[in-house]
Image (cartoon, rainbow, N blue to C red):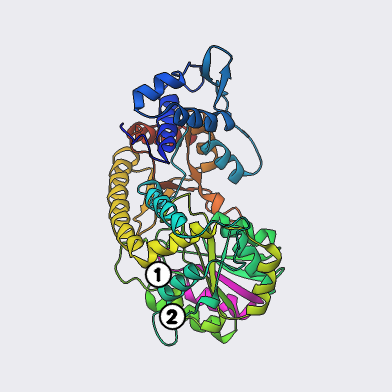
Amino acid sequence: MNPSKDSTFAYQAVYRYLVELIEANNPEGQQKLPSLRQLALRLNVSVSTTKYAYSLLEDEGRIYARPKLGYYTRAMPTAPLNEGAANLLDNVFANARQPGMLALSSDAPAMLLSLENPLLMMERELTRQYPRSHAPLYQPFGETELRSVLADRYTHSTTCYWRAEHVYIGSDLRSVLELSLEALNLHGMVALVESPCSWAILRQLQVARIRVIEMPLGDDGRFDLQKVQQLIQREPIRLAVLSSTVSIPHGSLMPAEDKQQVCRWLAERRIWLFENDSYGEFSFVPGASRYRDFADPERLLVFSTFDKIIGSEAPYGYILCRLQGAEFHRLFLERAFRLSPIRQKAIAKLFATRRIDQHTQVLRSMLLDRMQRMQGLLHEHTEGQLQMITPQGGAAIWMKAMRPVDMRRVFERLLAKRIVIAPGEMFSQQGAWQHHLRLSYTIDWSKDIDHALKLLAQAIRDEC
């Protein structure tokens, strides 16, 4: 490791080095860490850089300082956090964030390859160009440059077009979804969602007191269209939430003709379509159709985030919607998001220079490679135990136990081995998919994944 001494972000590399150093040792025991000066000499950085990295770990509660003795790691509890907690989702996320845990439950593509460093370098360059203001002028709906570049990116025809005024940017996905449901007066209504469905969407619908009707996807990635039509005719559905290309977390692609038919029925009933485009760029099939290709543009809202492609330094969520502009304006003004203007301009620059397109192309190739590696290991260690749906994109594999197995119990068994999986019932409000699980292939491949999958297979056998 030889980060440049004058690099503004060298502390991030030092921080990652320390995290790996801590996790490589026994996380349940206590260990003494190198002194600030020792680490600075070892990594060829300044003492102030190592001090800042240590302070981050101290704030997170991973380490503590002993006067005149140095820094020590905190011993981690042997029992997983929230064990036996009623809320499975919170249990999964609390444990996945613990040091020393191998999280096979994540689904963040940018973990394989992020754009965080180019983003921060672009931000630093723009900071020099724009005059410093004592009172930053925050744009209530997002920076104009970023709204414009997103509008251009989503425009594909004279009917499927967007303008900057149709784009709204908020602090995260949860915030923009919350405001969208309120702006369109959908609180307390009925929603149709694909199932399995993103836990983040299910949780937001629950907060808005929306009754959810789940339409299961078949192994071929298709709905039972006859049942969809019957539901739309029978139930007072006001909203449908569907994935744009790859169904998340199912990993399948629905045929274009099926999407067209669903959009036709939604338009007839004037039902709002919320298209989840968070993984829209991660289809392995070129030219995959999207619902917005067939939807009524006056009843369409597209939502997404930047972090799936760029990384955690770009957590903002955004929506595109043509209608209810006055109501969106009122709610965004009330919320008064204070988002970094320079960070948004930097993101816009990455789009405008096509840096994001080049990055996404490489990232898709990496995702396909890791998916095939994970598939091979799963075939080797869980043959006859799990039935896999080969992903057509995205960052995770959806699987079903060949014999009935409660995956929540398998999850609890693996926690004792410091491994975290995502049981299928996380992706349903009605408790469906109990015999299913989702495994990510955007994981730390420097860890012993082979051994972890052997333990998964053993846990399934034990639970059977």
Q: In the picture, which quadrant includes the N terminus?
A: top left
Q: Residue at x 65, y 66 (%)?
A: 179
Most extreme residue toward the top is: 68
N-term-proximal mark, 2 vs 1: 1
Judging by the rendered image, the residue that carries numbered circle 1 is 254
Task: Give the total number of marks visible in the rendering.
Answer: 2
Looking at the rendered structure, the kind of residue marked 1 is Met
Q: Residue at x 46, y 77 (%)?
A: 292
Q: Is residue 383 magenta?
A: no
255 horizontally vs 166: left or right: left
- Percent x, y for residue 69? 53, 12
Q: Which residues are magenta?
A: 224-247
Q: Is residue 228 magenta?
A: yes
Judging by the rendered image, the residue that carries numbered circle 2 is 260
Looking at the rendered structure, the kind of residue marked 2 is Gln
Q: Is residue 196 visible?
A: no
**Residue 213 is drawn in which quadrant?**
bottom right
Tell me, yes or no, whether the two marked residues, 2 and 1, touch with CB atoms within 8 Å: no
388 horizontally vs 406: left or right: left
Along the line of sight, the residue nearer the viewer: 288 or 54: 54
- Percent x, y for residue 356? 36, 61
Cα–Cα span, label 2 and label 1: 10 Å
Along the line of sight, the residue nearer the viewer: 176 or 426: 176
Along the line of sight, the residue nearer the viewer: 450 or 36: 36
Q: Residue at x 46, y 66 (%)?
A: 277
Label 2, residues with CA under 10 Å away: few <14, some 14-19, many ≥20: some
Q: Residue at x 63, y 34 (%)?
A: 82
- Percent x, y for residue 199? 56, 54
Decide: is 308 above or below 296: above
Decide: is 298 above or below 11: below
Instruction: Kindly state the secondary structure of the residue where label 2 is placed.
Output: helix
